[in-house]
Amino acid sequence: MKQSSIFFISLIACITFASCGNSVTDEAETSGISAGETTKTVSFNLNDEGGKIVLNPATRVFNTDGKRYYAINILELNDKEYSKYAYGLFDANSPISAVMKEGHKYRIDVLEFRNDRDTLYHDGNKFYEPMLSNGTNATPLENAFVYDKNANLTGIYTGKTKVGEEKSDTTWYPRAYKYYTSIDNFDPSTSDKLDITVKRAFFGIHYIITPPKYGSVTLSLLRNHHITISSTDPVYDEEIFYSFNQLPPASVEGYNAIMDIFAVWTDDDGNVIANEKGEIKVKRNALSEFKINFIGLKDLGFDIKEETTPLDSLYQDWTVKAQ
């Protein structure tokens, strides 16, 4: 997949969530650089957005390997339009740097993906959506840029994510953490270091669901996510984080949306008792609490509907006469 003439890239960067990586020097290949053009190796210092979402340790459950990946597109400004220049897939332990032409301006788009309940699917070192290159190709994790005028990482701007081997293991709202940012008009002649802060593009929901007194309820949300709770289950008390589907707007402060949620309540024989739609307001970088209760008849079958209003007073006289 590496192309064209050879350049040496000094990969000296500090990728941090809590700490910095070590500096190394790798060989990479560049294209589109004419003879006599001055180039510069620019190191990227990537940081996550500051601040915290408070998590409840009593309810938070991590099913994660904690791995983080960075997908980066570099586009070059030509005649007032950006064109493809380079792309790369990196892990959290690798320094990142790229060779750029001085006097030219670039746009850098960065996606950080952090595994949580959903983990990014890969086959060996080949990663799938949203890390596809040129639209359909799995991208190798090489910790180096590929300099290409015709291909880049096409899927990093949307939520579509493959989290398993099966075709059905694709979600538009993964239960994982995505961060995104875009830097415009960067001129490498101004600096050989570029500090980039990636913004949170995810939201959380704290579900508190009281089970129905009978039967079971299936909640469906975000295209392919489901929660099922039955009468014999304890109270469902979980915090789950989801990434938004449209990452560029979702990484902007104040972004919020209305999420539809569908409830299908069935009795023990599979008969539908209720089929309703509700809404949850969700906000970037926020945890929304959502309580759900189910109200129904105390027992299944036919009941007498009894009045609940206070009894009226009725007066009658009965006089019994002696013979």
Image (cartoon, grey):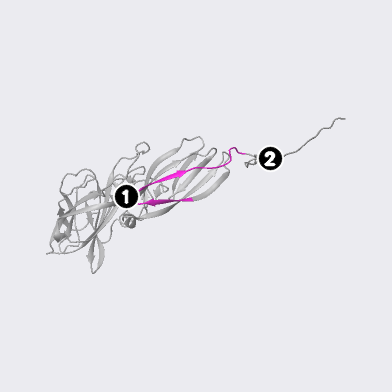
State the image coordinates of residue 157 (x, y, percent, origin top left).
32, 56
Q: Nearer the viewer, residue 182 or 3?
A: 182
Q: Nearer the viewer, mark 2 or mark 1?
A: 2
- Residue 165 lies left or right of residue 320; in this view the side is left
Residues in magenta, as a range: 278-300
Q: Nearer the viewer, residue 76 or 62?
A: 62
Q: Nearer the viewer, residue 255 or 41?
A: 255
Q: Give the number of the disc on residue 313.
A: 2
Q: Give the number of the disc on residue 178.
A: 1
Q: Residue at x 40, y 47 (%)?
A: 169
Q: CA distance from mark 2 to mark 1?
A: 68 Å
State the image coordinates of residue 280 (x, y, percent, origin top left).
43, 50
Q: Of the residues under marks 2 and 1, which one precedes in the sequence? A: 1
Instruction: Give the residue type at disc 2.
Output: Ser
Q: Nearer the viewer, residue 25 or 226?
A: 226
- Say whether residue 172 is visible: no
Q: Can you say whether 95 is above or below 103 in the image?
A: above
- Numbered-mark total: 2
Using the rendered view, name the quadrant where residue 59 is placed: top left
Q: Can you say whether 241 is above or below 188 in the image?
A: above
- Say whether residue 82 is visible: yes
Q: Give the number of the disc on residue 1.
A: none
Q: Residue at x 38, y 44 (%)?
A: 240
User: Mark 2: which secondary structure?
Assistant: loop
State the image coordinates of residue 110 (x, y, percent, origin top left).
26, 54
Instruction: Give the residue type at disc 1.
Output: Lys
Q: Can you say whether 107 is above or below 50 in the image?
A: below
In the current view of this chain or complex, which residue is farthest to the front?
322
In the current view of this chain or complex, which residue is farthest to the right?
323
Quarter of the N terminus within the rendering: bottom left
State the image coordinates of residue 259 (x, y, percent, origin top left).
43, 52
